[in-house]
Amino acid sequence: MAKKATKTITVEQIGSPIRRPKEQRATLVGLGLNKMHRKRTLEDTPSVRGMIAAVSHLVRVVDEA
């Protein structure tokens, strides 16, 4: 069987976690972001989308493929 191509999403951290709730900091770490302007390419799943929505003021979606 052919392997199904997984959709990916690239996010960039644009906001600082300083003076943010502990949950928001943990969400950024869960996304693999911990410093400004870092980018991560992640699998496009509902859980990742939910994490991005929770910290939408701190991250920016760069690319959806």
Image (tube, grey):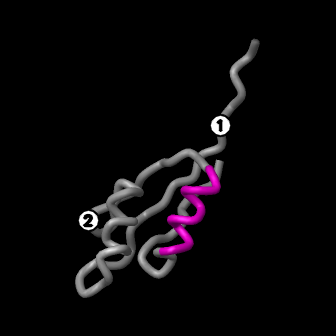
Q: Pointer 2: what residue?
A: 35
Q: Is residue 12 left or right of residue 49?
A: left
Q: Does dot 1 land on a helix, a strand or a loop?
A: loop
Q: Residue furthest front?
A: 23
Which of the 4 image quadrants contains residue 13?
A: bottom left
Q: Residue furthest right?
A: 1
Q: Amino acid at mark 2?
A: Lys
Residue drawn at x 25%, y 87% is: 19
1, above or below 51, in the image: above
Q: Is residue 46 magenta?
A: yes
Q: Amino acid at mark 1?
A: Thr
Q: Which residues are magenta?
A: 45-54
Q: Position of residue 14 (x, y in %)?
A: 39, 74
Q: Pointer 1: what residue?
A: 6
Q: Is residue 12 left or right of residue 9?
A: left
Q: Position of residue 2 (x, y in %)?
A: 74, 16
Q: Earlier in the sequence, mark 2 or mark 1?
A: 1
Q: Is residue 18 left or right of residue 55?
A: left
Residue drawn at x 29%, y 69% is: 36
